[in-house]
Image (cartoon, rainbow, N blue to C red):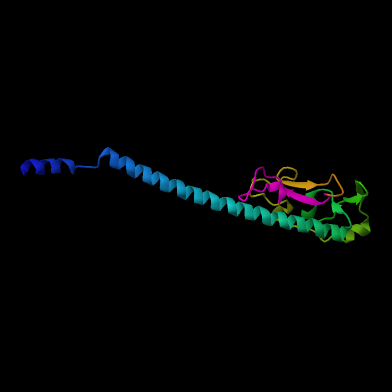
């Protein structure tokens, strides 16, 4: 009887190596699940933010075109307080630059997209706000004139390329 008690007493001093390793593995698995969910939620929030800014930029380009009779020459023109000197107009199979007259400039009601410092909004997926990098403004073809795209590389959580939004 004393032999059994002494063995039992000896084993109660701490955890075995196997028990410690099992606890570490369980904690690691739980942490991996938690970090994946946090990252996924953050990514969804960034995508929602970028979609919202993209929608507003597209709306601003349309309103600019309705007021001025031509598309802005640069995407940043929708963020300015003063009317730009030139715009873009589809003409057959080409895009031509038109110069706004003083009468045309009176129709300008900008800024059509208001963001602090009168600049483009930051793209939540790229972290920047540069035209041609973070926001793509298509001006090459009459069929795509005035279209705004997201410049982020990769796909969203549903598998669609960001540029195809």
Question: Residue 47's x, y, as percent?
Answer: 63, 52
From this viewpoint, is residue 114 visible?
Answer: no
Where are the magenta residues, as a range? 144-165
Q: Nearer the viewer, residue 3 or 141?
A: 3
Question: Residue 146's x, y, as percent?
Answer: 82, 51
Name the chief secondary structure element in magenta: loop
Quadrant where the image shows the N terminus: top left
Q: Nearer the viewer, residue 118 or 39?
A: 39
Residue 126's place in the image compared with 112, above or below, is above
From this viewpoint, is residue 4 visible?
Answer: yes
Q: Is residue 162 magenta?
A: yes
Q: Nearer the viewer, residue 90 or 76?
A: 90
Q: Taking 48 as reference, is 136 left or right?
A: right
Quadrant for residue 133, please give it. Answer: top right
Q: Residue at x 72, y 49 (%)?
A: 164
Report the number of discs: 0
Question: Residue 13's x, y, as percent?
Answer: 19, 42
Q: Residue at x 68, y 57 (%)?
A: 52
Residue that sits furthest to the top in the current view = 17
Q: Residue at x 89, y 61 (%)?
A: 106
Q: Is residue 70 magenta?
A: no
């Amino acid at each position: 009887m004393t032999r059994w008690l002494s063995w039992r007493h000896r084993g109660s001093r701490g955890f075995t190596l196997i028990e410690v390793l099992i606890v570490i593995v369980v904690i690691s698995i739980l942490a991996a699940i938690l970090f994946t969910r946090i990252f996924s939620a953050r990514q969804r929030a960034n995508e929602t933010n970028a979609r919202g800014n993209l929608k507003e930029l597209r709306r601003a380009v349309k309103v600019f075109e309705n007021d001025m009779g031509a598309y802005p020459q640069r995407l940043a023109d929708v963020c300015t307080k003063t009317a730009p000197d030139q715009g873009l107009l589809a003409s057959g199979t080409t895009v031509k630059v038109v110069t706004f007259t003083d009468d045309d400039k009176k129709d300008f009601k900008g800024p059509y997209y208001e963001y602090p410092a009168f600049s483009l909004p930051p793209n939540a997926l790229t972290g920047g706000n540069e035209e041609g990098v973070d926001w793509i403004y298509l001006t090459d073809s009459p069929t795509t004139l005035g279209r705004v795209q997201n410049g982020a590389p990769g796909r969203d959580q549903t598998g669609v390329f960001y540029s195809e939004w």
